[in-house]
Amino acid sequence: MQYIIFSCFIIYVAMMFVITWITARKATNASFFVGNRKSPWFVVAYGMIGASLSGVTFMSVPGWVDTRSFTYMLMVFGFFLGYIVIAFVLMPTYYKLNLTSIYSYLETRFGRFSHKTGSFFFLLSRTIGASLRMFIVIIVLQNFVFSHWGIPFEITVLMIITLILLFTVRGGIKTIIWTDTLQTTFMLTALIMSFIMVGSAMDLSVKDLFSTVWKSDYSGMIYTDSSSPYTWWKQLLGGMFICIAMTGLDQEMMQKNLSCKNLKSAQKNMMTFSLTLFLVNFLFLFLGAALYIYAKQMGIDAKGDLLFPTVAINYLGPLAAIVFIIGLISALFPSADGALTSLTTAFSIDFLNLEKRTDYSEKKKTHIRHLVHICFAFIFVGVIIFYYHYQNEHLIEILYKIASITYGPLLGLFAFGLFTKKQLKDTYVPFICVSAPVICFFLDIYADKWFHYSFDFELLLVNGLFTFLGLWLIRKKQTDN
């Protein structure tokens, strides 16, 4: 089985390199950063499904069903509301200013310190988030393949990150738009086939399996107890603002939208993508419930992130194992390639001012960009190895919690810029944007003790509100203008 899984991995990587070779020929810095703004919107929309889901969704959303039932669907509905805000509030601003890095807006609106602060919080959040998304895939490959051959986890991480680095360092967004399309296809195929095979293992048709899941205890969706972190309005609000922050204020996701030829195409992309993602997440939850029902019938002692790989690889036969691994590998690369490209873009433009350096030749800019790209790849290696010593049952919960802390300042900054006409005392902005998440971090820990209230992902909204109020305190008076 290890050789079959490894062969699938090698074939998939080879396909990635073929696409890279085709798309990265004559690549320039403009094609790396925004794909020369010629990406077809329907290709971007389809590919973004794979980029949004990642290995965490592939494993953690099904594994999450035992503790949260179907309450995650209310978050997904909140995502849809968030995508509307992104398409018709944020993206018009980005296109009007012809941005490459979306954080350049903050410099235009407030000043240099605000610009650097916004970009810093993106770099922090995306570095940690992308590393953990890669971790969940790499640890499965390590446990089911490379550990059997005596290969240390650290070497596995280095090998996989090096492969990802090789096929992203040249083409950037121009390449990723097309590799994401392939990856989305494999991931969705794996999802559908896995659902069918679980039903087959229980002698149920697809229709009967849907009916069984819907009648089970796992299908509960609406909680009304306001003290519970799973209350419906917390899920809805949390989903909406997490979507706005993690997509609309995230360079990786917006960089793909900004590669479309115009605003109208980007809006079509966003709304098409949001509707498709709604249906895909629904199917992931049904798969999770089906896996738990099957595991209970078979007496399988697995849950959380380990449920799907344990059932697929050890109980459903070789075909299911291959389908799962292909789906998982296809979830790995969107987590890494887009993150590396967006981090390289943000750092190169926001901190090195590479786009404005007229004294640099194109060749020198490319050399600097490559160096930044490589450095972020090795940071990924360090974060993944560090996290290896602490593993949580539901990694998706950790990711959303990190997002609630690190994206709050971005939410507050952009909201203040878009919905007020006030200017800020720019040098004070970093202090406000650090203070708000620190307060929210301790509030999350002690809220139940102090207020008998448990935060879920609506903490992001509170974080953004604290940032907004802090910025209001450092606004410039009319006499300062």
Image: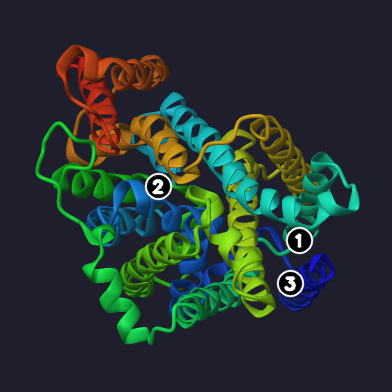
Which residue corresponds to the image point at 78% horizontal and 77% vertical from the top-left?
Answer: 18
Foreground mark, 1 or 2, reads 2
Asked if residue 111 lies left or right of residue 330, the reply is: left
Tell me the quarter of the picture where residue 481 sits.
top left
In percent of width and height, residue 367 lies at 81, 47
Foreground mark, 3 or 1, reads 3
Residue type of the residue flagged with mark 3: Met
Residue type of the residue flagged with mark 2: Met
Q: Assess disc 2: are there few (<14), some (14-19) or many (≥20) residues with their C-alpha within 10 Å of its C-alpha.
A: many
Q: Are marks 2 and 3 in contact (CB under 8 Å)?
A: no
Disc 1 secondary structure class:
loop
Asked if residue 273 lies left or right of residue 131, the reply is: left
Q: Earlier in the sequence, mark 1 or mark 2?
A: 1
Disc 2 secondary structure class:
helix
With respect to residue 168, does 195 lie above or below? below
- Residue linked to disc 3: 16
Relative depth, front residue between 314 and 191: 314
In percent of width and height, residue 39 lies at 52, 74
Quadrant showing the N terminus:
bottom right
In percent of width and height, residue 246 lies at 40, 47
Q: Assess disc 3: are there few (<14), some (14-19) or many (≥20) residues with their C-alpha within 10 Å of its C-alpha.
A: many
Q: Earlier in the sequence, mark 2 or mark 3?
A: 3
Query: In this orientation, does residue 244 appear?
Result: no
- Residue linked to disc 1: 170
Distance from label 3 to label 1 (Cα)?
13 Å
Residue type of the residue flagged with mark 1: Arg
With respect to residue 32, does 471 lie above or below? above
- Residue linked to disc 2: 246
